[in-house]
Image (cartoon, rainbow, N blue to C red):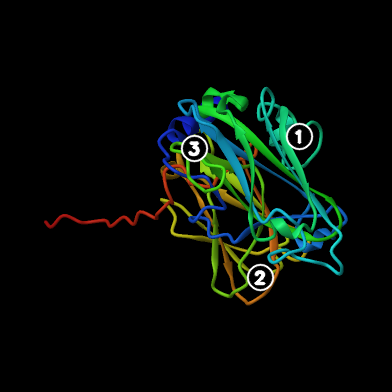
Amino acid sequence: MSTKLIILMGSILSCSGFAQQVPSNDEKIPFLCTFGKSSDPNWGDDDFVQTFFFVIPQTEKNPVYIRVFDPEVGGKNDEIHGSYNSKTRFSVYGGKGAISNPDAKKNTPTGNYKSGIELSSKVFTGDTANDNKWYTFGPFNPVEGELQPEFNGYIFKLVIEGMEGDDGNLYRLFLSSQPNNNKAIEGANAFAYEYSLRLFDTKGSVSHLYPFVGTGVTAVQIKVFDFDDDGILRIVSVAKKGELAKSSGNGNWLTTEHKVVNEEINTSLDIQFIKQKDSKNNNVVVNVTNQYGELMPFFTAPIGGVPKFKFKIGVKAEK
C-alpha cells in the first residue's frame, strides 16, 4: 500500500470519532472466530491465526485497555467438536515493528508476524470464569504502541492463535479507556488485513465489511474462504447500487473483482454477506487486495462513513 494512500487514511481517521468495538455495530457480525490448529479448514478457518490493529491518537495521554469478550474455549458461544480440547492465546504487541514489519500485515501467519515488543499475553482454555464475560489486557500507555504518523497515532497489535485442539473460539473485542467498562476513545479505530468471522444463522441476515479505497486504486479483488454456498455477496458503493457475486463453496476460496470508478476513490466499499438460507456455524475468512496484490485494511468504523449509493437523476431542460 502506498505511503500517499495511508497518509490520506490517517488524516481521515483522525476525524472518525468513536469506533473501538470489534466487530462494530455497522458491521453486524456476531463474533470473530479462531479455531484450534488441529481443526479441519473446511470448518471455516484457513490458518488458525487472526490479527487486529488498534490506532490510538497521538493526543491521547491516558492509559488504554484491550478487552476480550468470551476469550475461553468450550463455553456458551463457542463451536465444540466432540469433547472440548482447545487452547487460544491472545497476545498484545507494541513498540518498533508491531505494524511496520511487513510480516505483521500478511494474510498468512508466516515469518515474524509477532513482530514488536510483547506487552501482555494469556492462554485461555475452558475456564468457566471467562465464559461469556470480559477479560481485560492492560493498562497500556499509548506511547507503548508503535508510532505511525501516517495513521496519526500509536498502533497496538493483538494476535489471536488457535494453539491446540479442534474447537472454534468465538469472541469480540473492545478498545477501552476503562478496565472494567467499554468506553470508547475519541479518534481511535481498529482494523485488520484479513477477517475470520462468524455469520448469523438466519436467512435474510446481512453482515458487512468496509475496505477503504485510496488514491491510485483502480480495482479490488475480494477473496472469500468457505462461504458454504450459503448466500450471495453484494458490493455497494457511493457509485454502484450493488454488484452481486456467488458465494464460495465448502473449504474453497472465491475471488470477485470490482472495478473502481472515480467516485469511489477515498471512500469505503460495503461488502455485504447476504444469507439465503437458515444454517448454523458458518465461519468465513475474507481479505481484499488492490490491483497490485497489496492487502487493503478493513476498518471497523468505515472511513468516511457507511457508503450510500448516490442516485443521480438527469434533468432535461425544456426547449
Q: Earlier in the sequence, mark 3 or mark 2?
A: 3
Q: Quadrant of the C terminus?
A: bottom left
> CA gap, disc 1 to disc 3?
23 Å
Report the disc number at residue 230: 2
Residue 154 located left or right of residue 261 = right
Query: Answer yes or no: do the residues labelled 1 and 3 have beta carbons within 8 Å?
Result: no
> CA gap, disc 1 to disc 2?
32 Å
Report crowding for label 1: few under 14, some 14 to 19, many 20 or more residues within 10 A (C-alpha): many
- Residue 218 seen in this snapshot: no
Q: Which residue is mark 1?
A: 113
Amino acid residing under circle 3: Ala
Report the disc number at residue 215: none
Q: Position of residue 271 (x, y in %)?
A: 55, 55
Amino acid residing under circle 2: Asp
Q: Which residue is mark 3?
A: 188
Q: Position of residue 195 (x, y in %)?
A: 65, 50
Amino acid residing under circle 1: Tyr
